[in-house]
């Protein structure tokens, strides 16, 4: 079972549904990172297990805060990082996430 997950773009169309699916499987903690470029915060499920960090995944300060929250264990087997590429073009997503 996935214990915790970081969902980038989790306020978006696909990402918010992904968050709901993870909640349904019993995830205990989900961190959503979204800069709200093309989504509304209301899309993120209202659930005590879910927290929304408003910011870009390209911002080092956002990543540092998340890693601290996971006590540096973001690579543990029960933790999952999900990058819901905000742009349809993979090359563009890599160059400008
Ligand atoms: N919607 C579909 O039916 C569908 C189908 C197949 C594939 N996809 C792909 O899935 C991906 C997401 O599609 P979607 O429809 O959910 O789009 P969306 O615009 O609803 O969601 C993308 C989310 O990413 C956020 N975002 C953008 N830049 C960010 C950044 N730098 N840091 C953090 N968050 C950022 C946006 O604010 C938004 O919430 C796209 O790559 C799309 O091509 C979508």
Image (cartoon, rainbow, N blue to C red):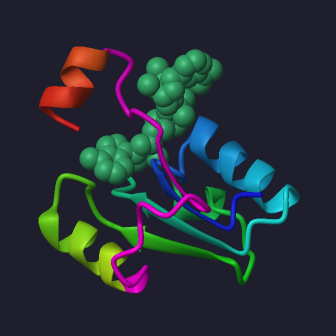
Residue placed most toward the observer, 53 or 27: 27
Residue 58, image x, y percentages: 18, 52
Magenta: main secondary structure: loop
Residue placed most toward the observer, 22 or 39: 22
Q: Residue furthest front?
A: 77
Is residue 38 in view from this perspective?
Answer: no
The residue lying at 42 percent from left, 60 percent from top is: 75
- Asked whether, in this view, residue 17 is left or right of residue 68, the answer is right
Residue 54, image x, y percentages: 37, 68
Residue placed most toward the observer, 13 or 3: 3
Q: Is residue 39 above or below residue 88?
A: below
Name the quadrant containing residue 89: top left
Name the quadrant containing residue 26: bottom right
Question: Total label count?
Answer: 0
Q: Is residue 14 above or below residue 47?
A: above
Residue 18, image x, y percentages: 68, 45
The residue lying at 28 percent from left, 80 percent from top is: 65
- Asked whether, in this view, residue 75 is left or right of residue 41, the answer is left
The N terminus: image quadrant: bottom right
Residue 3 is inside the magenta segment: no
The residue lying at 62 percent from left, 63 percent from top is: 42
The C terminus: image quadrant: top left
Residue placed most toward the observer, 42 or 86: 86
Residue 78 is inside the magenta segment: yes
Is residue 46 in view from this perspective?
Answer: yes
The residue lying at 72 percent from left, 84 percent from top is: 48
Residue 46, image x, y percentages: 73, 73
- Asked whether, in this view, residue 97 is left or right of residue 17, the answer is left
Please provide the residue range marked out in magenta: 69-89
Name the quadrant containing residue 19: bottom right
């Amino acid at each position: 079972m996935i214990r915790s997950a970081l969902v980038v773009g989790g306020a978006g169309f696909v990402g918010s549904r992904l968050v709901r699916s993870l909640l349904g499987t019993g995830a205990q903690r989900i961190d959503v990172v979204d800069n709200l470029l093309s989504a509304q915060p209301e899309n993120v499920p209202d659930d005590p297990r879910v927290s929304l960090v408003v910011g870009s995944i390209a911002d080092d300060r956002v990543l540092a805060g998340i890693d601290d929250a996971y006590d540096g264990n973001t690579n543990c087997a029960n933790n999952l990082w999900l990058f819901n590429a905000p742009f349809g073009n993979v090359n563009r997503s890599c160059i400008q996430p």
